[in-house]
Amino acid sequence: MATYTQLLAAYDTAILNLLSGEHESYSIGNRQVTRFDLKDLQEQRDKIAFLAQRETSGAVRVAKMQRITK
């Protein structure tokens, strides 16, 4: 399976190709996408970018919890 960083590169390539009019269909990971809407492609790319950043930074966010006293 591809890493999120590899998927991000595939999404970037797909967006560039869509903008240049070079391709009407793309393979991203194990999925085939045909005539994908640019807005949808960018939304998915943003989600993958977030996951790729977490994958490469190794950072984990921990919520600060406080007890509410009455």
Image (cartoon, rainbow, N blue to C red):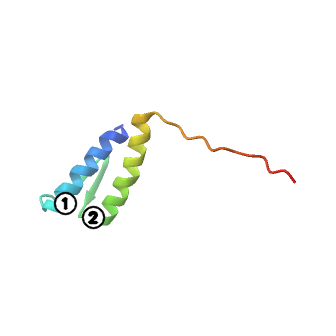
Q: Which residue is mark 2?
A: 38
| The N terminus: image quadrant | top left
Q: Amino acid at mark 2?
A: Leu
Q: Nearer the viewer, residue 36 or 9?
A: 9
Note whether residue 29 is visible.
no
Crowding around mark 2 (Cα neighbors within 10 Å: few <14, some 14 to 19, many 20+) is few
* x and y, in percent, of residue 26 in the image: 23, 54
Circle 2/circle 1 CB separation < 8 Å = yes
Element carrying mark 2: helix
Q: Nearer the viewer, residue 44 or 54?
A: 54
State how far apart marks 2 and 1 are (Cα). Answer: 7 Å
| The C terminus: image quadrant | bottom right
Residue 39 falls in which quadrant of the image? bottom left
In this picture, residue 66 sits left or right of residue 51: right
Name the residue: 32% across, 59% down: 42
- 65 above or below 44? above
Name the residue: 15% across, 58% down: 23
Element carrying mark 1: helix
Crowding around mark 1 (Cα neighbors within 10 Å: few <14, some 14 to 19, many 20+) is some
Q: Which residue is mark 1?
A: 18
Residue 43 falls in which quadrant of the image? bottom left
Q: Amino acid at mark 1?
A: Leu
* x and y, in percent, of residue 20 in the image: 13, 60
> Which one is earlier in the sequence, the residue at label 2 or at label 1?
1
Name the residue: 80% across, 51% down: 68
